[in-house]
Image (cartoon, rainbow, N blue to C red):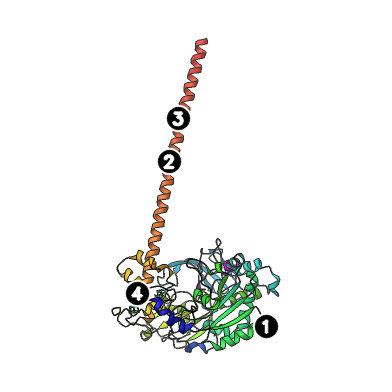
Amino acid sequence: MLSLLSPWIDAAFGPGRIRGGVHAEEHKSATAALPIATDFPLPKRLYVPVQQHVGKPAEPVIKVGEHVLKGQLLAHSQGLVSAPVHAPSSGTIIDVNEYPAPHPSALPIRTIVLETDGKDEWQQHTLIADPFALSPEDISLRVGTAGIVGLGGATFPTAVKLNMGRENRIHTLLINGAECEPYLTCDDRLMRERAENIIDGVRIMLHGMETSRAIVAIEDNKPEAFAAMQAAALPYPQLTVQQIPTRYPMGWDRQLIRYITGMEVPVGSRSSEIGVTIHNIGTAYAVHKALRHGQPLVSRIVTVSGGAVVKPMNIEVPLGTLISDLFNFCHVRPDITARIVMGGPMMGDALPHINLPVVKATSGILALTQDELKSADEQPCIRCARCVSVCPAGLLPLDMANNIRNNQLDAAVDLGLKDCISCGSCSYICPSNIPLVHYFKYASGEVMARQQAQHKSEQTKRLMNDRNARMERIARQQQEEEAARLAAKAERERQKAEQEALV
Ligand code: SF4
Ligand code: SF4
């Protein structure tokens, strides 16, 4: 079926350049025209989780009662893949404990609570006149100690990616300015207002990766951002700013790589293996701040939007700000809020309540009304195959969902469940309102739980085997020792008998 639809897709988007995707309603006009607000009142308390990144959680280095300055290290990274967290303002640490995570489960996560002192006083940080005089290794080191992670939502530690870039001889650095999720405009505004700083960050990343070429990709629904970025990049021949079609999920790294370079990332491989790496424009901006101003990542720009928001806006807030504080500032109406979403409506997470903090991954917080939610009743599948034609990962959503419904998870895995990126395009397009992506999220969770259980049982079995082997070894040693003791005793008695015989 996919092959039947491919000519249509190619005719529409160029041969092999875009796979699937949908034209989702944008809902961006409420915030796209407004400058980034910087007048958010400093919250009385900030809740800073020690894990805001992919990898090991950071380990607190402060004590309750300690006074800290803005930018001071609160928790250091652990291991190769991790990132530190820093104080988003000055004040006193009043707790280090478990608090709900900004996640659909709101499960507790270790969190440092900072009571702000109202001074917002930075720790001393050194301006760096020429980051290009630093070695590439030093760039990675400073990016790592600044706690920078992928701000497009992936939250992979940026320093690790820079190091991998050097090791894999990356030929192209792609900077993702697609911002293809509906409602979100924080990247759009950042590019319009701080283009020179972003381009500076991109150049520093190129230096850190020892790569010679960068391409900034921006969807063609952001002409002002494109113009600003193009003007900022003009003096640098190694940088290209390129418009890409507006089509969700254009910002998915494999889609973007395929469109820009014509190269395909093989299933199960990393993009670095084909010489390409992707960073978000917000990440490039954070690199600029760290390498020019010595400032760690302590704030981010968040889109607050949705039908229940009276004053939608893009706003720069300290990390650890509670969503309830944000909603108060933006006059969100709880009486008409049907769903709270962190991120965009397609791939974001529905949150159970608003007493959860803004973290490094928080690109947006949406307060959606019932009208904005697709809530029509599910109808039987009419086998129209639209879900197949829009899947950017080339999967068969209908067949996968049928297998999941019949509790045949292995069959769904065989059909590529693990390659599903939960983009929601299939659910969006389905005329029968079948919540396909919900099936895939559920099934992925089940498969992961099953793998974890299997891993645990294998670990238990290994521990049991190790224990049994140890017990056998000890028993053998004891037997050998006893045999040696008896042999020695027999020898002593023999010698004694010999001596007595001589006497
Ligand atoms: S889009 Fe919906 S109705 Fe059409 S084949 Fe897929 S699941 Fe069935
Ligand atoms: S949610 Fe998964 S199956 Fe559906 S379109 Fe996206 S990648 Fe394909």
The disc placed on residue 482 is 3
Q: CA distance from mark 4 to mark 3?
A: 69 Å
Neighbor class of circle 2 (other Cα within 10 Å; few <14, some 14-19, many 20+) is: few
Image spot of residue 478 (x, y percent): 45, 34
CB-based contact (under 8 Å), mark 4 and mark 1? no
Q: Is residue 483 above or below residue 16?
A: above
Residue ID at (44%, 46%): 466
Residue 304 seen anywhere in this rendered image of the structure: no
Q: Inspect the image, locate mark 1, and give the three-letter code of the amino acid beneath it.
A: Pro
Under circle 1, the secondary element is loop
> Along the polypeptide, which appears first: circle 4 or circle 3?
4
Image spot of residue 48 (x, y percent): 51, 71
| Residue on which disc 2 sits | 471
| Residue on which disc 4 sits | 398
Q: CA distance from mark 4 to mark 1?
A: 50 Å
- Asked if residue 339 lies left or right of residue 67, the reply is left
Foreground mark, 4 or 3? 4
- Quadrant of ligand 2: it is bottom left
Q: Would you identify the image quadrant in which residue 369 lies?
A: bottom left
> Along the polypeptide, which appears first: circle 4 or circle 1?
1
| Residue on which disc 1 sits | 235
> Along the polypeptide, which appears first: circle 1 or circle 2?
1
Q: CA distance from mark 3 to mark 1?
A: 84 Å
Neighbor class of circle 1 (other Cα within 10 Å; few <14, some 14-19, many 20+) is: few
Neighbor class of circle 4 (other Cα within 10 Å; few <14, some 14-19, many 20+) is: many
Magenta span has 153?
A: yes
- Main SS, magenta region, reads loop
State the residue lying farthest toward the top: 503
Bounds of the magenta span? 148-162
Q: CA distance from mark 2 to mark 3?
A: 16 Å
